[in-house]
Amino acid sequence: MGGPESSYHEPVLAGESVALLVHGPGLYLDGTLGGGGHSLAILRELERSGWLESSLLVGIDQDDDALQEAGVRLAGYRGHAVAVKGNFRDIAVLTAREVALRGMEPKAAGILLDLGVSSHQLDVPVRGFSYMQPGPLDMRMDSGAPGTAADILNSVPEAELAAIFFRYGEEPLSRMIARAVCVRRVEKGPFLTTDELADAVRSVVFGRERVMKALSRVFQALRIAVNHELEVLERALEDAVALLGPKGRMAVISYHSLEDRMVKRFFSSLTTADWGPKGVGLREPVMPAEAIAVTRKPVCAGAQEVARNPRARSAKLRVIEKKEGADE
Ligand SMILES: C[S@@+](CC[C@H](N)C(=O)[O-])C[C@H]1O[C@@H](n2cnc3c(N)ncnc32)[C@H](O)[C@@H]1O
């Protein structure tokens, strides 16, 4: 694990997200601390702007490796940065505890969620996230949480497995793959490793490109199911917005359409006023918009960044700003 410049994970859209997020001193929350790349960029920007003294960054991650890495990387900002173990589902409670310890208000100037897994999680075979290398079928971001990918594969009925592959992976051959998993379960016993799952997929999907796509979708689907990613995100978005102070900003970077759809819909519900039933012609909305869209369209990585870091290819950054008085 590394120091300020590290190979743990290269932050995606770092310049863009920090430029749109950091706009004054205060409390900054990074709900997906990872290797601390974005957090470090936020702290550097606060320092460069002369706002560091009156700022605190709280970084949250459920992965012990991430906390260890980020701890090393952010060591130069002791007193202005704290790394907390937890799930961003609990962002309200985790933040309340950290700010209470420092006598601060739980009102954030900026919140960042950089969703999904880190390169480190994908690169380390023992975490079982990748079909590229053999490893145990684990896929838990929090290694202490109950329920691994193997537990799901070995216990869930065929129809439910197909639903997981279809819903979370948008895999068109979900039923055939679920069937292959269940047949293999009966013939050869429980799944233990990533390459056993990859072989089951290859037994019913043919053609190099189709196989690669199917593997990527099936592994993504299982990972989302293991970590309850969409349910967690839905709850966290609500709670995070409630934590924003007036003119506080929230930036979310998503990597697949399921996440992005959820973020887009949620942000749109915050930035759209409710004018009641059509044709009534009210002078004021029944419910004014709570926030304004800082990004009208998602910000995507440029060709240079994608060439340097292929993970950036699918990234979409969306940012909103809470209106003054929206809490009253
Ligand atoms: C894409 S990486 C973030 C990388 C980070 N921005 C950086 O610059 O290194 C996502 C991180 O969020 C963490 N994570 C994902 N979902 C989480 C959740 N619900 N609660 C806490 N951490 C989560 C993962 O463990 C992973 O370390």
Image: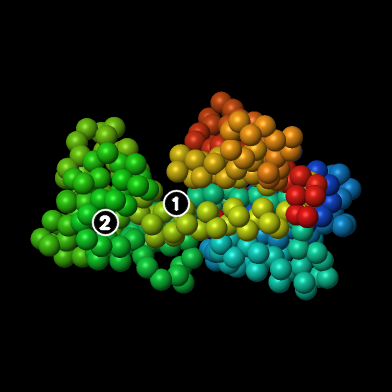
Image point 21% across, 65% down: which residue? 190
Number of other residues with Cα within 10 Å of mark 2, as a class: few under 14, some 14 to 19, many 20 or more: few
Image coordinates of residue 250 in percent, x first then y, are: 68, 47
Residues 164 and 50: in front is 164
User: Element under label 1?
Assistant: helix
Quadrant hosting ligand 1: bottom right
Image point 56% across, 26% down: which residue? 303
Image coordinates of residue 244 in percent, x first then y, are: 73, 54
Image point 19% across, 36% down: which residue? 206
- Quadrant placement of the N terminus: bottom right
Image point 65% across, 38% down: which residue? 275
**Label 1, label 2: how far apart the Cα atoms are:** 25 Å
Residue 215 shown left or right of residue 263 in the figure? left
Tell which tag, 1 or 2, sits nearer the viewer: 2
Residues 88 and 16: in front is 88
Q: Residue furthest top?
A: 303
Number of other residues with Cα within 10 Å of mark 1, as a class: few under 14, some 14 to 19, many 20 or more: some
Which amino acid lies under the numbered mark 2 shown in the image of this protein? Glu
Q: Which mark is residue 160?
A: 2
Which residue in the protein does label 1 denote?
A: 122
Looking at the image, is mark 1 or mark 2 earlier in the sequence?
1
Q: Is residue 202 visible?
A: yes
Above/below status of 210 relative to 106: above
